[in-house]
Image (cartoon, rainbow, N blue to C red):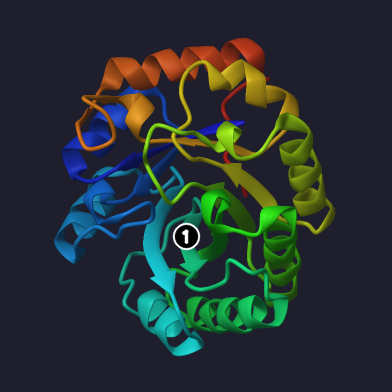
Amino acid sequence: MQLLVSVRSAEEATAALAGGADVIDAKDPAQGALGAVSRAALRAIDRVVPADVPLSVALGEAASAREAEARVAALTLRARPAPLYVKLACAGCADGDQRYLTHILAAAVRVARELPASPRLIAAAYVDASDGSRATDALVDAAAAAGTAGVLLDTARKDGRSLLDWRNLRELRRWVARAHAAGLLAALAGSLRAEHVPVLAAVHADVFGVRGAACDGGRRGTLSGPRVRALRSLLDAVEPPPGPRAHIG
């Protein structure tokens, strides 16, 4: 698994990089689970993240294809040799309507492909707002049909419960396998903590995403380089890198 760390400023991005994060994720925790940072903050983060380090940008939730297109079209970032990801959830998709999901995601993918930076779309679902496994399976199928790069499971409510309070290891392992079979990256987030690293290593997801676990004072606190480094060490202990760290493609 690669370590994705969510940051809200250039200063936090610098600390996350120093701690060994594989992917820097621009996100404003005050705006929700996938809250977008301001354009000024995003430009500043983009400047300090080296072009060969993957950058992820949270875009929030879209309730229609038009809204999804607008959120992606507003992204003005430089092209980079490392992947640029955009994370988007579909509002009102908790019932697992695959056709609706595909329609919205396909619209976002079309716009993304037209941008100079060619961002890769990651479709997100909230496990605490979905109708069991049917909705999260529908996300995988819709994401594959729409041509996205990957899928993400997260939690909408940050109330102390984690992803593992909503899905057990068997369910997560099956979901990750389904995503991989569809040719998608599989990312896990949702109030994940250090003790979840060895547990989730057995699930074989591509990305382990954190915010609160990397901060002093919780997800709305200040990102801590030493906390990121501790997470990096845990990940390397359960899944040692074979050589120079490879980025997810």
- The amino acid on which the numbered mark 1 sits, given as a three-letter code, is Lys
> Is residue 218 visible in this depiction of the protein?
yes
Residue in the image at 39% along x and 32% along y: 160
> Where in the figure is residue 164, as x and y percent of width and height?
59, 32
Q: Is residue 241 visible?
A: no
223 vs 149, left or right, is left
Residue at 36 percent across and 35 percent down: it is 211
- Front residue of 218/43: it is 218
Q: Could you tell me which residue is drawn at 47 percent across and 60 percent down?
A: 87
Q: Which residue is identified by label 1?
A: 87
Q: Residue furthest bottom?
A: 66
Q: How many marks?
A: 1
Q: Quadrant of residue 79?
A: bottom left
The residue nearer to you, when weighing 143 against 61, is 61
The reply, left or right, for residue 194 in relation to residue 96 is: left
* Image quadrant occupied by the N terminus: top right
Q: Is residue 1 left or right of residue 183?
A: left
Task: Identify whether 155 is placed above or below 68.
Answer: above
Q: Nearer the viewer, residue 210 or 39?
A: 210
Q: Position of residue 200 (x, y in %)?
A: 65, 26
Circle 1: is it few (<14), some (14-19), or many (20+) Cα within 10 Å? many
Instruction: Please state the horizontal and vertical placement of residue 155, each as a whole percent of the image.
Output: 48, 47
Element marked by disc 1? strand
